[in-house]
């Protein structure tokens, strides 16, 4: 099985370039959105930033990660549940992380994170997906407790 597909214009595209990870949370979408979109809460539910102090730096937030100091920039607050954010790594590389909170019912929502492969190996991609799945489970636990 090939890792790429032929497009109609002759170019090739990576198969499995992204993976959508989701979780249903028994809380109103707005409640989950307000908690998850606040960068100061990231260390509470995103394991890669756990225990890190979050600091405001102009239009970005900085915090420690296992890779070193990272900068995080969220899209502006919005009525659509969009929490896309770019993470700038210590190397200077910036990674876009699409993240959404979708209303399902008045007191129930779905959080969807799109994990993008980039230059990751299959093993790294699988490990990253497992880490994000754990992060989403922690977000659910926190939101459903409060």
Image (cartoon, rainbow, N blue to C red):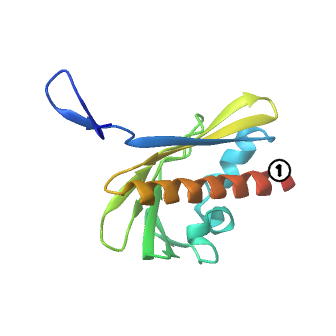
* Nearest the eye: 103 or 34: 103
Residue 91 drawn at (x, y percent) = 30, 72
* Left or right of 49 on screen, residue 73: left
Q: Residue at x 38, y 68 (%)?
A: 89
Residue 73 drawn at (x, y percent) = 45, 58
Residue 107 drawn at (x, y percent) = 82, 35
As drawn, 58 above or below 2: below
Secondary structure under badge 1?
A: helix
One can see residue 146 in this view: no
Furthest toward the front, the residue is: 1
Residue under circle 1?
144
Q: Label 1 neighbourhood size at 10 Å, few (<14), some (14-19), many (20+)?
A: few
* Nearest the eye: 100 or 18: 18
Q: Residue at x 63, y 72 (%)?
A: 50
| Quadrant in the picture for residue 145 | bottom right
Q: Quadrant of the C terminus?
A: bottom right
* Left or right of 11 on screen, residue 3: right
Q: Quadrant of the N terminus?
A: top left
Furthest toward the left, the residue is: 10
Q: Residue at x 63, y 69 (%)?
A: 43
Residue 105 drawn at (x, y percent) = 77, 27
* Nearest the eye: 84 or 16: 16
As drawn, 135 above or below 57: above
Furthest toward the right, the residue is: 145
* Left or right of 76 on screen, residue 35: right
One can see residue 145 in this view: yes
| Quadrant in the picture for residue 5 | top left
Furthest toward the top, the residue is: 8
Q: Residue at x 58, y 60 (%)?
A: 131
């Amino acid at each position: 099985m090939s890792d790429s597909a032929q497009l109609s214009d002759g170019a090739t595209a990576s198969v499995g370039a992204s993976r959508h990870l989701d979780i249903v949370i028994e809380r109103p979408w707005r409640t989950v959105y307000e908690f998850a979109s606040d960068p100061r809460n990231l260390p509470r539910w995103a394991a890669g930033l756990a225990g890190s102090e979050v600091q405001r730096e102009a239009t970005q937030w900085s915090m420690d990660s296992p890779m070193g100091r990272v900068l995080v920039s969220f899209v502006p607050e919005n009525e659509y549940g969009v929490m896309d954010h770019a993470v700038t790594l210590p190397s200077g590389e910036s990674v876009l992380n699409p993240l959404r909170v979708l209303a399902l019912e008045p007191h129930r929502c779905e959080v969807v994170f799109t994990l993008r492969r980039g230059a990751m190996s299959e093993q790294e991609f699988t490990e990253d997906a497992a880490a994000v799945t754990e992060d989403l489970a922690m977000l659910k636990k926190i939101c459903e407790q409060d």
